[in-house]
Amino acid sequence: MNNRIADLTKGAILPHLFRLAVPTIGSSFMQMTYNLTDLLWLGRVGEDAVAAVGAAGFYIWFGFSVLLITRIGAEIGVSQSLGRKETGTALQFIRHSLFWAIIITLVYAFGTWLFASELIHFFGIPSLSVNEQGATYLRIVSLGFIFTFVNPTFAGIYNGMGNSKAPFWYMTSGVILNLILDPVLIFGLWFFPEMGVKGAAWATFISQGLVFVIFVYRFVIVQEMIKLNLSHFRLNRQISKRIFKLGIPVASESALFAFFAMIIARMVAGYGSVAIAVQSIGGQIEAISWMTSSGFATALGSFTGQNFGANKWDRIKKGYILTMIIGTVLGLMVTALFLFMGKSIFSVFLDDPRAQKLGATYLFILAVSQLFMITEITTRGAFNGLGRTLPPSLIGILFTGLRLPAAWLVITYTSLELYGIWWTISLTSVLKGIVLPLWFINAMRNKPYKIPKPADHKQVFLIPSRLRQQIIIRRIFRNKS
């Protein structure tokens, strides 16, 4: 494994960040391309098909959120272990994170397949066609959740090792296959039958399966990080506990975020299938900014994790400042794009002029928050690298949760209606982008030099207090007998 590890504690900082971020961003865009490709082709089928896949997509999003437990646990656990030169502990994090990813995925996939129809009906969409197509799509993709949701944990392991190029190329292979299969299976080209929404689901299933096979081959055959003989695998309670302790705050916030988004979508559904289609596509378009910033946040998290393990606080501060500068430039560019090109962007996906106009309004409203959203995501990466996953989760849950009562108040007591819902989304993002960086700056000003230098066989634990987390060091690998 050593020849695949990047030492982020030495050398120029900016090249490290770009070398990690660019492949990670590419991998994120590869993942986004699955959804965009589906929506692009299904937009030619009709708005009902887009709305159906959009409704089902919330449960895929929710699944990704739950599996952040193992992805975040792997990224932080592996990066900090390698920063302390503890390769054996890093391997333990790799094996345990994959084990728990598989277990959690199997449970979630079974529940989704079993209750697919009820899950789609939750949104209260009046169209019978949308409900039927959404349930069908969800059942098919749930069969491939073992591929879809375990792949990000594989990617998280590579990110923690400082090697984000590998998952990018693996994801690219799946996207290329999906680009080919989508029109073939949706419209029935060559000797394939026309399957519509079913075709989009099967294309995603097959493409994600290819990526999974590549990951398994690399880990099992080439790098021998995983042993298929389970008789040699023994669960380590402390490693498992550490993975869940790191991942649950992030996963809880993301899962709640997805749940809040479902409630918001249910409100939006009251304005018709066009509104649902616009919000579904708009969310994918907005992913341009949050996936790009998430790539730099992941890079910053790996960079911060290794330098935290090496007790190099000056590099941590410089890395954060450089990443924030990059994020600011990105935020301004996306803001301009959404303000002035909204209708043109939506015309690629939807032919209906009414839908294009509504989509342009959606992007105009969301443009206000892009810079702040990127600032929040960047700061989240820095917190994660320190092993302090609770502060960004608390801020995220608080202000995202405010969207529900705020949206209800707006649509009840003002004439903004649908636009008011979108304004609550945008303005709460602004608040998160202000509060979280202030928290991080305060933490870096007051805490770092009071933290003991990490020593052998020690691990970082998160101890919540009333106002903020304290970081302490505790020995976890000693024999307690």
Image (cartoon, rainbow, N blue to C red):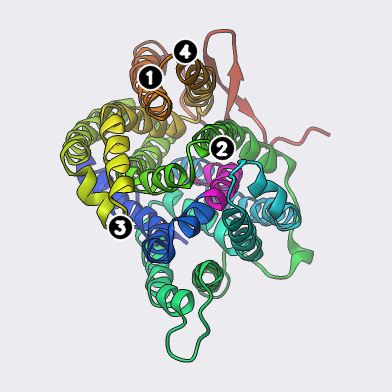
- Quarter holding the C terminus? top right
Q: Nearer the viewer, mark 2 or mark 3?
A: 3
Name the element at disc 1: helix
The residue tagged 3 is: 351
Q: Is residue 167 left or right of residue 342?
A: right
- Residue 336 or residue 78, whichever sits in front: 336
Q: Which residues are magenta?
A: 55-75
Q: Which mark is residue 262?
A: 2
Q: Is residue 319 magenta?
A: no
The residue tagged 4 is: 413
- Residue 396 or residue 250, whichever sits in front: 396
The residue tagged 1 is: 440
| Crowd rating for badge 1 (residues with CA inside 10 Å; few <14, some 14–19, many 20+) | some
For marks 4 and 3, the one nearer the N-term is 3
Amino acid type assigned to the residue bearing label 3 in the image: Asp
> Residue 267: x, y in percent?
53, 32
For marks 1 and 3, the one nearer the N-term is 3
Name the element at disc 3: loop
Q: Nearer the viewer, mark 4 or mark 2?
A: 4
Q: Is residue 270 above or below residue 231?
A: above
Q: On the image, which quarter does residue 447 sit in? A: top left
Amino acid type assigned to the residue bearing label 4 in the image: Tyr
Instruction: Identify the main secondary structure in magenta.
Output: helix
Q: Judge whether residue 6 can be spotted in this image.
A: yes
Compute the Cα span from label 2 to label 3.
Answer: 26 Å
Amino acid type assigned to the residue bearing label 1 in the image: Phe
Compute the Cα span from label 4 to label 3.
Answer: 33 Å
For marks 2 and 3, the one nearer the N-term is 2
- Residue 339 or residue 389, whichever sits in front: 339
Q: Judge whether residue 215 can be spotted in this image.
A: no
> Residue 77: x, y in percent?
54, 42
> Residue 174: x, y in percent?
43, 70
